[in-house]
Amino acid sequence: MGSESATVKGFWWIRTEYSAGSGSGTGEIVTGLKDKYCIVGIGETSYSRNSGRSTRDLGAEAVRNALADAGLHPWDVDGMINYHVGDSTLSQTIATDLGIRLDFYTDTFGGGSSTETIIGIATGVIEAGLCHTVAVYRSMNGYSGLRQGGSPGTVRPPAKVVVGPDLDTTPYGITSPAQNFQFTFARHMYEYGTTSEQLAHVKVACSNHASNNPRAYYNKRVTVDDVLDSRWIVKPACHLLDCCIETDNATCVIVTSTDRARHLRQRPIKIKSVAGRVNKPFQGMYSHYQCDPITRQAGYYANRVAFRNADIAPEDIQVTGCYDAFTFTPVLLFEGYGFCDEGGGGDYVSNGTINLGGARPNNTSGGQLCEGYTHGMNLVIENVRQLRHQADDSCPGWENGVHSYDYSEGGCRQVPDAELAMNMGWGTPAVASALILGR
Amino acid sequence: MAEYMNLILEVQPTDSEHRGYYESARQGRLVVQRCTSCGLLRGIIGAACPFCTSGGWEWEPVSGKGTIYSYEIVTQAIQPAFRDWVPYPVVLVELDEQRGVTWRWGIEDESVSLRLITNLVQRDDPTKPEDEANVAIGKRVEVTFLNLADDFALPQFRLSDEDPEHEPWQAG
């Protein structure tokens, strides 16, 4: 590659290495671990808004359920990774409660986009020989405890001290995720004509799927009009029903090598690739608004890592799990990962593709819009079920993979012959993560 | 330090990035950081220059004129003191200075502009939010200052007399 001196005064480098997709583009050899590691166990608690339990108790239950699902004993697990935003109970506590002695653990800070990322970290630490079987979990009282962005409706508290980067936004009444992301949403509506009706279809699809999931917090089907008639939270893109369902829950997946997985209880679901956390050039919660196009999600970059290492293309994916904090987030993720063109997300989510029975169903459990908000974990758990062909719907033979594929209310939610599934995580418009799983 | 909307706004002794910003505002000047190495401005306060990595910078007064690049109307306030304000607009203002600087040779079709996040306040009263019906992408705005203490003013933006930059757009 030729070199070209930068001409702006003060630049001290010359252009020698950067090209489109540098570090994550085509033609560059990067060692992946395709199919070398698996998800062998999944576990969760119920989804509620009044757990009345500690995140310690919830977390222990989810990890215990995942162990049971995998057919693992406590002494078979030697690694733990948890993510939190100051709310979850840390690895050492849960491990002690369950009699697990750890050779590796870490508790990482972060919300959405953490799920896929730390599953990737789990494969990395196993590959590095630090441990061999990792329980990845998240525990949160996401409604009755710490709510993202704060809890509206409380009495006027003492004056809050605002310092540092928060000075740039908090005095303007902008703190919650719906408020933080809204400039991207509004600009997308302006530039591409994306409509509230199109967004409502994301919720409608999730509610239809949730009606076939007994675990879902909201399992009533809703219509486009129900969404449009719900009260505004933040205009122009977030009615109440455009927002996910904050819940109390804990969730766990267990990662181990394909070699070990052969001897366990469940069909292992192979990890084809992981990306995360992948960022736009200006990656802060608000600084990304300096850099156009602000309508672009960081999946634009993450898709190169995810698809290159899995050695497949978007059209090969049969099921998606898109981080649906809001109805708008899947729109941007589908664009970023190349399931449609930039600007085409509104059409993609409203043309039937994402429905059960459609070409590529999304969030078949009902997702965070209906099953429950978990910071992404339940979307991975559901894709594991789909690839096992064990969506736990009302089909009598679901445990043996026997399904009716009748997606009417209260019926089936299994995608036929699911072989490849993808999760797309979201931190902000500027932060992405991804996970491709295969049967 | 200043008190506003049940918030105590404080530039701590170690907050080297915000030092001077609110004092300038109190003197009626909107300032942004200018890199003393490459000379480029930046719209969000930071410790170093994303264009050239230099840590050297100085405050540079700007015109305080710009265009609404995106907006939102908050109808459910999270912060308690803002509950009396709903529905209130928050705007992403693109300043007139240094628009559309190509990022990394334009390889990913990216460019960088100076954008500030503030409320859109009433033209004659910066303590009150502008009517949501008047908020639209493309409208021209100008800075105004809400004096909160002897050495502290909060920059806000209000609609200006200028014609919109393009056909104003608000979601239907």
Image: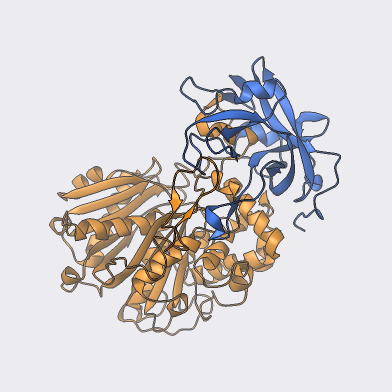
The chosen color scheme is by chain
Name the residue: 64% across, 16% down: B151
Q: Residue furthest top?
A: B150
Is A363 on the left-hand or right-hand side of B169?
Answer: left
Q: Tell me the blue chain.
A: B
> Which part of the image, by quadrant, shows the C terminus of chain A?
bottom left
Figure colour of chain A:
orange
**Residue B136, image x and y in percent?**
77, 49
- Vertical order, A253 against B78 (above or below): below
**Residue A38, image x and y in percent?**
26, 68
Name the residue: 58% across, 31% down: A155
- Vertical order, A299 against B116 (above or below): below
Q: Nearer the viewer, residue A248 or A120?
A: A120
Name the residue: 39% across, 67% down: A306
Q: Nearer the viewer, residue B103 or A237?
A: B103
Can residue A401 be seen? yes
Name the residue: 50% across, 22% down: B12
Q: Nearer the viewer, residue A54 or B99?
A: B99
Q: Nearer the viewer, residue A375 or A66?
A: A375
Total marks in image: 0
Can residue A244 be seen? no
**Residue A249, image x and y in percent?**
39, 53
> Which part of the image, by quadrant, shows the N terminus of chain A?
bottom left
